[in-house]
Image (cartoon, grey):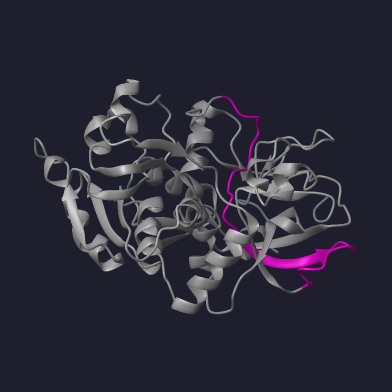
Amino acid sequence: MGYPDTFEGFMIEDQKKWTEFKKKEFKPKPFEDRDIDIKIEACGVCGSDVHTITGGWGQCPLPICVGHEVIGKAIKVGPKVTTVKVGDRVGVGAQIHACLECKICKADQENYCPQKVDTYGASYKDGTIAQGGYASHIRAHEYFTFPIPDNISTTDAGPMMCAGLTVWSPLVRAKVGPGKKVAVIGVGGLGHFGILWASTLGAEVYVISHSPQKEADAKKLGAKEFITTDKQDWAKPWAFAFDFILNTADMTHTFNIQEFMSTLNVNGEFHNVGLPDEPLPKMMAQDFTANGCKMGASHIGNRPEMLAMLKLASEKNIKPMVETLKISEKGCAEAVQRVKDNNVRYRFTLTGFDKAFGT
């Protein structure tokens, strides 16, 4: 049938065959008054895509089209849309809907709305399963559709839609800025954004990593010092050093978590944005008492935070480290396999959508 009745995407049909993408048609949700149809031009590849299709986060509805770092052009807008017009370059992140009426939404916490709909693998009220951005088009509510500043390239903007926002939100909510010492655990897709944002916000940034070969990149991104965890008692010189630790690692279940938490200042926070497949290490309540520290986590961010992040990136000309691949069965397979293998510097954006879908 084709657009507007159906969209086309690269989908997987079996989590045991998670690199076997097939181009298939799927039916989008019914178009509503505040919806926007976007012809996709690029889509970032997120660790969430890999956790989903491999079954690391459990079963998902199949077939599924993943991808929630979407950039494209608005080609249709509903009659009640006020923030986007046809022809605008826009982005969509990891959330595509919320009720926008509950106390959570009215407090600008729509990313925690009990009725939120994730960009892929979640069900709308009518039963339609949301499908993501490895596709020809996406249909999104205007509140979760974001104008992209002209001087941010499409390939750079894609990873900002999820990875960028996921680390931006906890940093600004923690009031990270001048006078604060921030440690970022991990230099990867999330971690490299954490270094960029925290340093641009004015904090003194340190990187904690098990990969010494990433030191030069970390310092180029804005880190003051690079701390490796490969030596015994590595944490002792850093006792009470950091006001905020942003943990972007995907292997927290392997950590001696008490060592990391010992580097927090009094009442400091260990904040998780990396979400591994495995449970956190065993902990005791007493582990928090030596410095009165706390542990938390967060889920993406809200619309005002997204707009502020894009504004800062535009004003400061901030550029993430991004590799590109052409979207195809082969391109999608290579992208997710290399993300799974941690073999990307440091984010992928899929391109070539016009050729792949004939749009």
135 is higher (above) or lower (below) than 122: below
The total number of labels drawn is 0
Residue 69 in view (yes/no): yes
Give the camera-side residue of 48 and 291. Answer: 291
- From the image, give the main secondary structure of the stretch colored magenta: loop
**Image coordinates for residue 178, horizontal then vertical, percent:** 35, 66
Give the camera-side residue of 357 and 133. Answer: 133
- At a point 64% along the width and 37% down the height, the residue shown is 64
Displayed quadrant of residue 299: top right
Q: Is residue 246 magenta?
A: no
**Image coordinates for residue 211, horizontal then vertical, percent:** 20, 47
Q: Is residue 68 magenta?
A: yes
Residue 282 in view (yes/no): no
Give the camera-side residue of 148 and 98. Answer: 98
Left or right, 321 with reference to 60: left
**What range is drawn magenta here?**
59-86
**Image coordinates for residue 236, horizontal then vertical, percent:** 12, 40
- At a point 29% along the width and 66% down the height, the residue shown is 222
- At a point 58% along the width and 79% down the height, the residue shown is 150
